[in-house]
Amino acid sequence: MKTELLIIGAGAAGMAAALSAWEAGCRDILLVDRRDRPGGILPQCLHKGFGLACFGTELTGPSYAEQLAQRLKITNVRLALGTEVLAIDADKTALLSDRYGLTELHFDRLILASGCREKSIGALPVAGTRPAGIFTAGQAQEMMNLRGQDPGNEILILGSGDLGLIMARQLVLAGKHVIAVVEKEAHYGGLARNFRRCIEPYRIPLLVRTTVTEIHGHGRISGVTLRRLDSGEEEQISCDTLITALGLIPERELVRKLGDPDWLFLAGNCRRVHDLVDSAVAEAERIGKEATR
Amino acid sequence: MKHVDVVVIGGGLLGCFAARNLCRWNLHIALLEAREDVCTGISRANTAIVYPGYDHKPGSLKAELCVRANARFDALCRELDLPFSRCGSLMLSFGEKADAVLKKKYENGLSLGVPGLRLLSGEEAQGMEPALAEGVTSALYAPTAGTVNPWELGIAACESAVANGAELCLNTRVLGIGRSLEGYRIETDRGLFSCRAVVNCAGLSADRVQELLFPAAVHIAPDAADYLILDKAAENKPTHIIQYEPEDGGKGLSAVPTVEGSLLLGPSERENEVDFAVSAEGLSFVRERAARVLPGLDLRDTIRSFAAVRPNPRRSDGSSIGSFVIEHPDPGFWSLIGIKTPGLTCADELGRHLADQVASFLNAGVNETFDGHRSGVKKMRGMSREQRNAAIRENPDCGEVLCCCEDVTRAEALEAIRRGATTLDGVKRRVGAGMGRCQGSRCQQKLIALLAQELGVSEAAICKDGAGSEILGSRRYEN
Ligand SMILES: Cc1cc2nc3c(=O)[nH]c(=O)nc-3n(C[C@H](O)[C@H](O)[C@H](O)COP(=O)(O)OP(=O)(O)OC[C@H]3O[C@@H](n4cnc5c(N)ncnc54)[C@H](O)[C@@H]3O)c2cc1C
Ligand SMILES: Cc1cc2nc3c(=O)[nH]c(=O)nc-3n(C[C@H](O)[C@H](O)[C@H](O)COP(=O)(O)OP(=O)(O)OC[C@H]3O[C@@H](n4cnc5c(N)ncnc54)[C@H](O)[C@@H]3O)c2cc1C
């Protein structure tokens, strides 16, 4: 199989890149994503706060995704969902796997729009046991908003990036007890807007200059040890769930060994982490055009 | 009451291989495991090295079994259909004292007949392994050292035992042992067993299990160890197993390029701890040693840390024991007590050794129908493109990648469940889903749904591993 422009990832960036490449005249575009709906992480972000710059109003994640998907429908961009890209070779072939078979796809240009992954707690030098009940924030968000799965009740959140803040609010609204949001820096990590909307109104304690040094519990997590970084004081806290928001890592595994060939373009969160979807989209639109020239 | 010829207590590596080797004889065998799955104890957390055997005292059982086990390891892994990487090992010295230790080990190894051993200069070692730190003064190269995934090996042995007629009883904890007309009466939390012989491979509890009926001359004094795992994408990983013999005689470090492609670093050493819980000091120790020996590693590539527990055997006067302890307090009763390194390497040999003794005691005939071949789960990763395409054409589930870090498909996860995985860790141990750099944050939620669907239970009932490790709360959200 052959295509002129392959785009990996049908999140906000991938869809925006496809649209702008189409508008710039590219007529042979394939957009692939492993998920079975377009939008990337947007469909799991049920809160409002997307698209102020692009649409002049605050949309939810799913409706933002829907806007882009609708615009894609009136183009001839081909969308292959439920399709995993397994490998990219230097000779400009991609290896695709879906339920129908394995496909070697030749392309002229590639836009990688594969988003990012969350740093997991395994990366931190945290002592203690390795029980159930520890989730990343994005995972908890997907569980609750897309799968109807309940992460737990007495919840500590480690990390105060936007994901941590947004999940703190959602958990409180779902009737959970959010014991605290814990942050090692002296200030929360996310946008001021998210702090004002998600933490302040619900009086969720924010513990800065604090970290988790040990995990307790057999079977399910039963608590953690918190350390105050300035005083060195330690304190044990009970919880049945730990949600980590430790930061996002651009997902570039597929192209790690390829260097910087002139046919490869990066867009969206795999290029750099965007706090706002509008900025990911604006960047992707520029990249879509660039890849069409 | 259930009647069998032999009860094997404990489904770790040693129990699984004892059961498998007992199947070579005409014997009815029950393998009793307290937990929800096999290989959840010591066999789950260790250094994963298949040792060449140069360390052991000439004439000892350890030396004999280890050298033989190593030589047979390719054949064993071929028979059990699992990957074995004979990557070789380099033991490093950074000074005169350690040079002398390596020289002794080398000579010891020669006298044991360990094949291919070579003493290398620092430059030669660095030539073979550019990732090494400066200042290596000598190295002992053992080309026959290798690595295997320990739980994959144990699970394979267990599947092979079951295929040859052994009965696996999970969630079955031995609580008491008495005598019966036939031999022994085994009380468990799932009913009574009566048998003619007992093989006790209860790992960290092996001394206490023996004491349910007999005194034990050897007791276990556990201590803990910590490990780190680096992502397979980490740069400057060694391609050989690297071991380091510190000049001050203290604890060294092993770096093992695993069959999965990640790098295992450890272990640390801690006194008197019995919990599989990581210690902060242990982690810093491993990090410090790793930075010293393999300075090119970026420890930010760490994806997981875990703890292990060593079952150190001690005599009643507290002195430690260097050899493998096989207690035989009664004509039909055997215990393996405190089998640590190289217990993984020797699991099959120890199993054979015991099975032969049991069979001779019971006058058992050879089981002519024994078939040692087992087929592993067909892994998409590593297949040729043609094979993989054909597999998807035959079964669409082979085309659906569930764990994107380790490239594990829905078909593999389903096969893991069909083969007995009932938990998230059970699936992980059988097919590797969730072992990679995102540590399951992208596949766990799908696997929970799949397990619930296949086992016919609610998602809230799905556990990470043992009882009480339910992953979800009880509420369902309707969206
Ligand atoms: C929880 C959260 C809340 C946010 N809140 C806001 C907000 O309120 N307002 C706002 O403006 N912005 C917000 N953002 C930021 C914004 O949503 C993101 O920056 C943007 O959606 C990122 O889009 P993307 O296309 O780069 O990545 P993604 O949406 O992650 O899309 C990447 C896609 O690539 C696919 N993919 C990756 N690798 C492969 C492969 N090998 N094969 C096949 N498919 C692959 C993935 O499945 C995924 O669908 C939020 C982000 C998060 C995570
Ligand atoms: C830190 C460390 C590193 C090691 N590294 C290596 C290495 O690199 N190479 C090597 O060759 N060897 C190594 N070993 C040795 C090897 O891992 C062990 O020898 C081997 O795993 C021991 O297996 P086991 O079956 O005795 O124990 P386990 O795997 O613990 O199995 C015992 C089983 O018995 C069950 N059980 C206990 N009590 C009962 C009961 N009452 N009723 C029913 N079931 C019960 C437990 O649940 C458990 O599943 C290492 C060991 C350690 C500790």
Image (cartoon, rainbow, N blue to C red):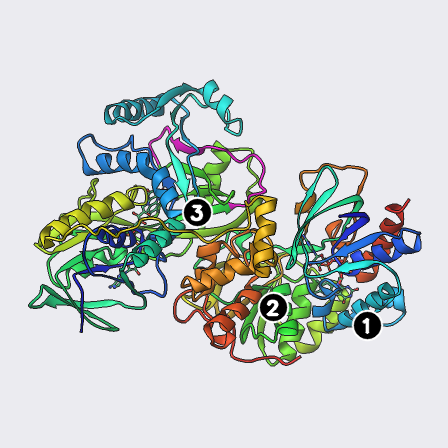
- The three-letter code of the residue at mark 1 reads Leu
Residue A88, percent from left and from top: 69, 44
Q: Which residue is mark 1?
A: A59
Is disc 3 in contact with disc 1, using a CB cutoff of under 8 Å? no
The Cα–Cα distance between marks 2 and 3, rounded to whole angstroms, is: 27 Å
Packing grade of label 1 (10 A; few <14, some 14-19, many >=20) is: some
Q: Determine if the magenta segment contains residue B235.
A: yes
Q: Tell me which chain the residue with mark 2 is part of.
A: A
Residue A89, percent from left and from top: 69, 40
Q: Which residues are magenta?
A: B230-250
Classify mark 1: helix, strand or loop: strand
In the rendered view, does B216 fall on the left or right side of B107?
left
Q: Which residue is mark 3?
A: B227
Q: Which residue is mark 2?
A: A140
Of marks 1 and 2, which one's residue comes earlier in the chain?
A: 1
Q: Is the residue at mark 2 in contact range of ligand 1, meaning its CB lies under 8 Å from it?
A: no
Residue A75, percent from left and from top: 88, 61
Classify mark 2: helix, strand or loop: helix
Quarter of image, ligand 1: bottom right
Q: Which mark is residue A263?
A: none
Q: Tell me which chain the residue with mark 3 is part of.
A: B
Q: Quarter-wise, where is residue A268 in the image?
A: bottom right
Packing grade of label 2 (10 A; few <14, some 14-19, many >=20) is: many
Packing grade of label 3 (10 A; few <14, some 14-19, many >=20) is: many
In the rendered view, does B239 fall on the left or right side of B251?
right
Task: Indicate the quadrant containing the C terminus of chain A: top left, top right, bottom left or bottom right.
Answer: top right
- The three-letter code of the residue at mark 2 reads Ala
